[in-house]
Amino acid sequence: MLIPVKGDKDNVKEWALIELQGKVEDVAGAELSNELGRLVAVQGQKDVVRLTVGYHQLEGKRLDLKKPFAILQKQQQQSAEETGSSVSYQVAGVIKSKYLFKTRPTALISKPASRH
C-alpha cells in the first residue's frame, strides 16, 4: 500500500535532535514542560554548545546526521462516496543535525541567568 507524502520544500522547518545520556525527570514529580533548558553556542569553538538545565550545565557538540529524518503529520480525509477514509502525510519538518551530550553535568554554584 502506498501512502502519499506531501510537502513544500521551501516551507519545511529544520529541527534538531537533542541526545542526552540518562533520564530527564522533574524533581516535583509533575509533567515536564515544553522548555527543557537553555541551549547556547560557545563562542570561538565551532559546533560546541552548552545546555543549562536548572542548576546543571552540560557541554556537548553539534553533529550532522548521516541520513536526515522527516517529521510527518498524519492527515485523514473522509470521502463522501465511501465509508472509509484516505490517509496522507504532510512533511512538517526535517531533522538534519543533532546535539550530543555524553558527559555528566557540572553543578552551577549560582542561579543561572534568567531570560528576559
Image (cartoon, rainbow, N blue to C red):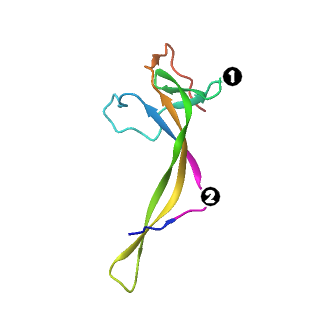
Q: Which residue is mark 2?
A: 11
Nearer-N-terminus badge (2/1): 2
Dot 2 lies on which element? loop
Q: Amino acid at mark 2?
A: Asn
Q: Disc 2 to disc 1, how far (Cα)?
A: 32 Å
Q: Which residue is mark 1?
A: 44
Instruction: Determine crowd level at label 1: few under 14, some 14-19, many 20+ residues with C-alpha closer than 10 A.
Output: few
Start and end of the magenta stretch? 6-15
Q: Amino acid at mark 1?
A: Gly
- Hey, which quadrant is residue 33 in on the image? top left
Tell me where residue 19 appears, x and y as whole percent. 45, 34
Secondary structure mostly seen in the magenta stretch: loop
Residue lying farthest bottom?
Answer: 81
Residue lying farthest top?
Answer: 109
Q: Which residue is located at x 52 percent, y 58 percent? A: 91
Q: State whether residue 2 is above or below residue 79.
A: above
Dot 1 lies on which element? loop
Could you tell whether 108 is left or right of 31 in the image?
right
